[in-house]
Image (tube, rainbow, N blue to C red):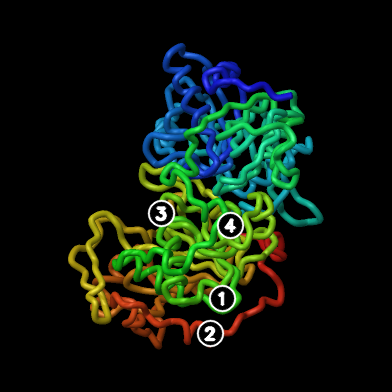
Amino acid sequence: MAEFITARQAAGLIEPEDSVLIGGSGGGHAVPEAVIEALAARYLETGAPRDLSLISVVSIGDWQETGFNILAEPGLAKRVVSGGFNNCPRFAALAFANEIEAYTLPQGVLSQLCRDMAAGRPGLVTTTGLHTFVDPRHGGGRQSERATEDLVELITLKGEDYLFYRSLPVDVAVIRGTSADEQGNISMEEEAFFGEMFSMAAAAHLHGGIVIAQVKQVVQAGTLPGKEVKVPGAVVDFVVVEPDQRQTYQTRHSTAYAGAARLPDTSIATIPFDVRKVIARRAAMELFPGAVVNLGFGVSNGISAIAAEEGFYRELTLTVEQGIIGGVPAVGKDAGAGINYDMMADQPYQFDFYDGGGLDIAFLSFAEVDGAGNVNVSRYGRSINGPGGFINISQGARKVVFSGTLTTGGLDVVPDGEGGLTLRQEGRTRKWLDQVGQVTFNGRFARERGQEVLFVTERAVFRLTDQGIRLEEIAGGIDLQRDVLAQIGFPVLVADDLRHMDPRLFREEPMALLTSFRQRQRRHASRSVASEKGRSHA
């Protein structure tokens, strides 16, 4: 039977050099923050425990001072393995300074790997990550020079290349739910994210480790319906009760995020009218009835609001990798949650669906693009973001639409309200380079597998072809040579029938896309991209 203890006592159970697997996602979704805070406080007070190996499937933090950010004290962690560092820039800084062993691996891989670890398997075999920076031929997911151990291996099965991601040791698993009964059974009825809590707990239990569960409340034994229990008390050793537990860092509690209420369409907020909305609108014009879609973080996240504003979100299946299927994914720092959804899946199942070719279109961001169509979102400048779910999603979808501004750093460009753009100041930093700093998406590999790839910016739309990247649309008010071609660090093709971007994109009122949306035909691939993953070699 589980023992009920304080967060401070829970932190005291973690020993030097332990491997600690912590649940939760991004902006506080099901993050056991009270235990994390207690661990950080213990270290600052006593200098112990030191040299931990911290593992998280998703980057955890509010981009400033919560989650893994408060664990980024020199000496506390010797190694961090995560889907990313974007939410925890303090660990990114330690990785950049080579003060920790830093690895960023695909979020879906780490999610599925938790299941394999729970089953006692040696690791996960998958094509996800081939020909990207997590491929051991291109770095093996390392983000610091201290990271010398090989966590990923290249193997061959039946003549095809695969990646083998090794199982990781787990001495302590720290998970979160909403309620615990007196026997330690854990339910998650108020959570905005399920994740892989049972697999995490089972992995620690299998290897003789301990499981700490943070919850909001305790209920009488036998009162939790068995169907609502997500982690059985048989694998829970300790329970920490935190009555002030928030649903996310930004939201204390939303019945819609919990799936307990459905909101009227009028309550779905629109996004501000600016170039980010222009980009999201143009990307949304690629949607068609019945499409199954992933919306990535950043600019692409706003597509859900566009679909709602234009009146056709119910005719799509919008998804996010954390497990939301249907409805309207949340935007901003609550991204990963959703409202009015049809299902909240455990995260490994969502990535099974993605890897298996379940996505018609993926909408993702870009930080850097090169002439081969490679995309970098994982490491650029002094930023170490990691891939998050980007690699699983971009390699599994039939069609990928990358979105972002053409340049950055002081860029001042606004829609003119009439049918084009006013470019008041060009960005100082180019994003379209001769060579990307890290390959998170391999353009050649995508073309060999027959993926359709578009790049949508505020001023131009491009397509990846077998001959290179081709410019197909340009915004009104934009000069082709000065404002587009001169801002790209490699030659691009220009379509013979170069078109102007739809003038409605640049006007504040809704675009009235419903009719044209319904006229688009659903396109079925004769064979999913996923079935071709291992058949071509870049």
Which comes before the other along the chain, label 2 or label 1? 1
Which comes before the other along the chain, label 2 or label 4? 4
Q: Are marks 2 and 1 in contact (CB under 8 Å)?
A: yes
Which comes before the other along the chain, label 1 or label 4? 1
Which residue occupies 43% across, 29% down? 70
Which residue occupies 53% across, 16% down? 49
Q: Nearer the viewer, residue 244 or 219?
A: 219
Is residue 435 shown to the viewer in this render?
A: no
> What label does residue 324 carry, if any?
4
Q: Which residue is mark 2?
A: 518
Q: Quadrant of residue 65?
A: top left
Give the spatial CA distance, label 3 vs label 2.
28 Å
Is residue 33 shown to the viewer in this render?
A: yes
Q: Nearer the viewer, residue 411 or 38?
A: 38
Secondary element at image label 4: strand
Secondary element at image label 1: helix
Which comes before the other along the chain, label 3 or label 4? 4
Which of the image's four quarters has the N terminus? top right
Q: Amino acid at mark 4?
A: Ile
Q: Residue 475 location, x and y as percent? A: 31, 78
Q: Are marks 3 and 4 in contact (CB under 8 Å)?
A: no
Which residue occupies 55% across, 73% down? 314
Q: Quadrant of residue 268?
A: bottom left
Q: Amino acid at mark 3?
A: Gly
| 360 displayed left or right of 69 | right
Pointer 1 local density, CA inside 10 Å: few below 14, some 14–19, many at least 20: some
Residue extending furthest toward the right: 158
Q: Which residue is mark 1?
A: 315
> What label does residue 332 carry, if any?
3
Give the spatial CA distance, label 2 vs label 4.
24 Å
